[in-house]
Amino acid sequence: MQPQPSRSRISARRLAALASVTALTLAVSTSAGNSRLSPGSSVAGAGPSALYRTSAHGPCMISGDSHIQMSEGIPTAQGYTRSTGTVRALTLMIDFSDAPGEGDALDRYREFFPKTREWFATSSYGRLDYRPEIPVPDWLRMPKSFREYGIERGAPFDPGYRELVDDIVAEADHKVDFQSYDLLNVLVTPNAGPAALDTVLSVTFAGNTEAPTADGVPVANASFVYSRQDDGSGSYDRTGYRVLPHENGHVFGLPDLYTAEGGGAVGHWDIMSEDWGANNDLLAWHKWKLGWLDADQVDCAADPGTKEYTLTPLARTGGPKLVFVPLNRHSGYAVELRTRAGNDEAVCRPGILIYRVDANVDTGMGPITVYDSRRDSGGCTRTPNVHAELSDATFTPGESFIDRRTGVRVTVVAADENTHRVRVSRTSPN
C-alpha cells in the first residue's frame, strides 16, 4: 500500500481489487547470471544494490524527476535496503491490551516464514539471501491500546506511527541491536484493527530518513502487517504470506503498480500489483532494477532499425530475460517471456509480455502499463482473485504490438519449449 507523498519519501501497501469483491479496499539457489551471489557486504543499512549494466545500457536507464516519490527509474535512489547478498530482516510480533495476541507469537511468524524467504530466493535466482531473525520470539506488548495509537490506513510516521515505532523500540531495545539489521518487519496480532477485506492497514515506510531512530539509526525501511489477508477462497495457508513480499518490495525501492481503480494496469504479472490469490513473480524490469539480472541478460534496443532478440523464460535461471525499448529519458517498452514456473503459478497463457514503464509516474499512479494482446476477452484464468482480463495479455508467434506514434513494433517471430524470438523495429531513435 502506498500513502500519498508527504515531506519525506514514504512507501506503503496497495489498494486490493478482489475479483470476488466489487468495492476497492485500497535457502539460496544459483544466480541468474553466473551461479554466485552478487557482491554485497552483510553490513546492515547498506544502500540499493549495484546495477549490472554496460555503456550500451545508458539509453535504457530511464529516470524520474525529483518530485517523484518512488520511481521506476534505474538505478534506484539511495535510502532503500540493499536487495542482493545477505539481508537481515528483524521480525517482531506485537500485540496490545485491547487486542492480545492469540496463541503463540511464533505461529504468527510461521504464517510468513519460511515462505517469504523462499519466494525471494526463487525470484532473485539466489541473489538475495533473505534472513528473517526473531530475537524476541514472544508477543511484544505495546504500552498503549491499539485504539490509543489511532492507526489508520496509510498513516505517515506522524503522530500514531511515530509513537508506535518509538514504543516498539523501547520495548525491544534490551534484546535487539537495531544497527545489525537491514529492515524491520512488524507482524501485528491479526485481531488488531479491521479485517483486510474491510480496510487494508498493512503499510511500508521506505527510504524515510525522518523516521524515528533506534540505536542511533533511523527505522527507515519498515513493513507493518496487520489482519490476515484472507480472500475467502480457502487458499490462505498457501497464499496469505504474499502481503509481506509485496511490502518488502517497497523497502527495496519498488513502487505500487495498482491504481485507484485497482489492479487493472498490470494485473497479476507482478506482486507489486496484486498480492491476493495465487502466487506471481516480479516483472523483469524490477529484477534488473533490484540487481538480479546481469548486463548480458538485458538488451537495450535504442537504435533505429530492426533487430531480433532471443528471450528465455523469466522463471528459469540464466539466459536473456529483458529487451527494453527506450522512448525518452523517462519511459520505454519492456519485453519479456513469462511461463508457468517458479513463482508464476497463475500464468495460464505463456508468451511474450509487453508493458510500458514510466519513471516519471509516481507509485500508485500507474507507473507500469501491461498491453493486452486480447482486449475484452475476459482472460484465461479461473484462479480466484486474479485480475482475469489481463491474464491472457501475452503475445504469441505471429502476433505484434504496434505503437504507430513512436514507430515501435514488436513481433513474436518464433517459439519453442525453451525460448521465444522477437523482432523489434523502430523508425527513429529515442
Image (cartoon, helix red, strand yellow):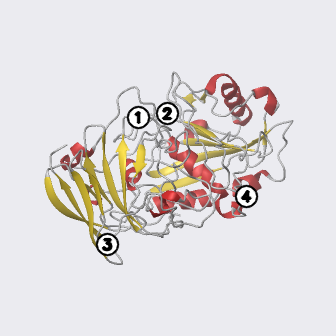
Instruction: Work out whether mark 2 precedes mark 3 in sequence or the reverse, and give the earlier one.
Output: 2
Residue 242: x and y in percent read 60, 55
Asked if marks 1 and 3 touch (Cβ < 8 Å), the reply is: no
In screen coordinates, is 154 left or right of 295?
right
Q: Where is residue 167? Give x, y as percent.
A: 72, 29
Is the residue marked by circle 2 packed among few (<14), some (14-19), or many (20+) residues within 10 Å?
many
Q: Which amino acid does the dot numbered 2 rest on? A: Gly
Q: Is residue 285 above or below residue 159?
A: below
Q: Which mark sits nearer the N-terminus, 1 or 4? A: 1
Q: Few, some or many C-alpha atoms within 10 Å of disc 4 (few <14, some 14-19, many ≥20)?
A: few
What residue sits right under mark 4 in the picture? 232
Tell me the CA gap for discs 1 and 3. 36 Å
Q: Which residue is mark 2?
A: 207
Residue under circle 1? 78
The N terminus sits in image quarter: top right
The Cα–Cα distance between marks 1 and 4, rounded to whole angstroms, is: 39 Å
Looking at the image, is mark 4 or mark 3 nearer the viewer?
4
Among the two numbered marks 4 and 2 on one chain, the one whose residue lies closer to the N terminus: 2
Residue under circle 3?
Answer: 419
Q: Choose mark 4 or mark 2, whichever is in front.
A: 4
How far apart are the two marked residues, 1 and 2, measured between alpha carbons? 7 Å
Q: Amino acid at mark 4?
A: Gly
